[in-house]
Image (cartoon, helix red, strand yellow):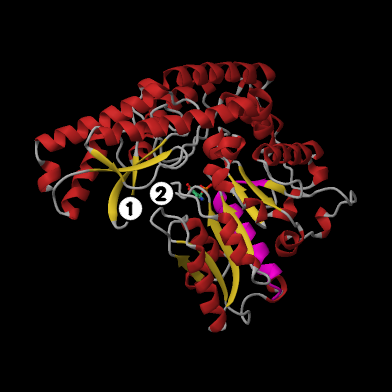
Amino acid sequence: MSKSNDPARVASRDWSSSELREALASAAEWVLAYREGVESRPVFPNVEPGEIQARLGAEPPARPDPFDRVLADFSEDIVPGLTHWNHPGFMAYFASCARGPSVAAELLIAAVGVNAMLWRTSPAATEVELVAVDWLRQALGLPADFRGVILDTASTSTFTALLAARERAGDDVRRRGLFDAPALTVYTSEQSHSSIDKAAMAAGLGLASVRRVAVDERFRMRPEALSEGIDADLAAGARPSFVCATVGTTSTASADPVRAIADVVRRHDDLWLHVDAAYAGSAALAPELRDPFDGWELADSIVVNPHKWMGTSLDCSVLFFRDPTPFRASLALTPAYLESEEAPATNLMDFGLSLGRRFRGLKLWTLFRCVGTDALADTFRGHVRMAADAADRLTSSGRFELAAPVSFSTICVRAVGAGEPDELDAGNRDILRRVNEGDSVFLSHTELDGRYTLRLSVGSAHTEPRHVESAVEALIRAADDLARTEAVAVGTE
Ligand SMILES: Cc1ncc(COP(=O)(O)O)c(C=O)c1O
């Protein structure tokens, strides 16, 4: 073989235009076939841990394979091990589907491959992000003094907000570290997401700093309990620093009373109010769904994940804030080799731990351009209706009761029965197993008041009423089967 035909030598250069064209054409065909056929796949894969790894080969290949072979292996060895988040029957957790425009935008993002760490390392990438975030702000009805950046996840956004709050508390942790800093305390409800605990762990405040505030019977933070907790901590010499209210909690999608919480926060100097609206925030695009957000405009920072309900692909979490100063104070650091002269420009690296920044703004901008706020709002309305209908059908079947009020597009139910709580929990666990084994729907569970609870959340742009209807039928069928075998009543599996 002549040197110029040696595949290894050829592959040490990048693909030629014709190779890339062929690969993109094959990949595009694959994507279309996948998306058209995803509904016929089992939404949850039937694989054992380690099974996919074992198929992939233990050592890196020294010689190149043609892309078509790699694509075939992806299709045959890897895709069967995926949980299909773009399956219309995906109603577990909170959905994260990639709408078409986001898929196309991801290709463009990969193709230009820019790093928007500084304005000058890709001016347009920075400015597209600023515009897309401002469009989102306007669409959600937030005041003009909020600005924001796109981070990877809500966990990172909340962590970043906590670092800013820690810096604003004035102990100069940035310079001195935490060794002699007074104990700061964090308040969030019993129902809020574990990312608040993680943020406290990672920020060096520790889990012991997190106060889980009691909720009411609708799983909403009780503002008076928050107030009492803050007063007790002040009396004990602690320094309350960060309150996180949630609109759209992870288990039940309940909404904390943000305005009343903001009133408590404003009674204290230097207390930071953060709102976690990672899932539900997108729904504020529809004006008639905005009531639960009342007061969020009073927050210091808010997180909304377009990658949850809005339909951008992972990762796209928008962190809004009013005042950039504490964010810069906590994390901006410019070594000589990153100095730039465009003084008024925004350098995205100043607003987070990571230096490198993906061109995430493009997928949010593309989604807005290709779908528009009217159709996005309609999607949310549709999902809320589907969830309400599902709740009605389930409760009127006589087999299920609501375990929490229906909120946004999420419902929590339990099969009713005559047994002891443990037996009923086992029966509900069994119902979930049976439903998920049916392959066409994927639901998840949670625990409420110590009881195993089934959870159905509609959030994918691919989910239509007929898919929710199938999920409802599958639940009722599983509950009927169990009732027939008396499994729910006697708790046997
Ligand atoms: C209310 C809430 N906040 C935060 C998160 C964490 O989201 P992420 O995966 O973007 O970190 C979740 C995840 O579902 C959530 O439900």
Q: In the rendered image of this protein, does residue 470 appear above or below residue 425?
A: above
Helix, strand or loop at mark 2: loop
Percent coordinates x, y for residue 56 in the rendering: 41, 35
In the rendered image, is residue 53 in sight? yes
Range of residues picked out in magenta:
150-171
Rounded to the nearest angstrom, the CA distance separating label 1 from label 2 is: 8 Å
Mark 2 CB near ligand 1 (8 Å cut): no
Residue 51 image-quadrant placement:
top left
Q: Quadrant of residue 436?
A: top left
> Main SS of the magenta segment?
helix
Q: Residues within 10 Å of mark 1 (few under 14, many from 20)?
A: some
Up the image or down, 50 lies above or below 461; here it is below
Q: Is residue 165 part of the magenta span, yes or no?
A: yes
Residue 478 spot, x, y in % from top left: 21, 33
Disc nearer the start of the sequence (1/2): 2
What is the number of callouts on the image? 2
Q: Quadrant of the C terminus?
A: top left
Q: Is residue 380 left or right of residue 357?
A: left
- In the image, 345: left or right of 361? right
Would residue 90 be seen by someone viewing this image from the given angle? Answer: no
Q: Quadrant of the N terminus?
A: top right
The numbered disc on residue 251 is 2
Task: From the top left corner, tell me how far across and down residue 208 is, in percent.
Answer: 47, 73
Closer to the camera in the image, 35 or 485: 485
What residue do we see at 42% from left, 27% from top? 87
User: Residue 153 in the image: x percent, y percent?
Assistant: 57, 47
Disc 1 to disc 2: CB gap under 8 Å: yes
Q: Is residue 381 left or right of residue 58?
A: right
Residue bearing the label numbered 1? 447
x 27%, y 53%: residue:
451
User: Is residue 36 or residue 142 the one in the foreground?
Assistant: 142
- Is residue 157 a member of the stretch shown in magenta? yes
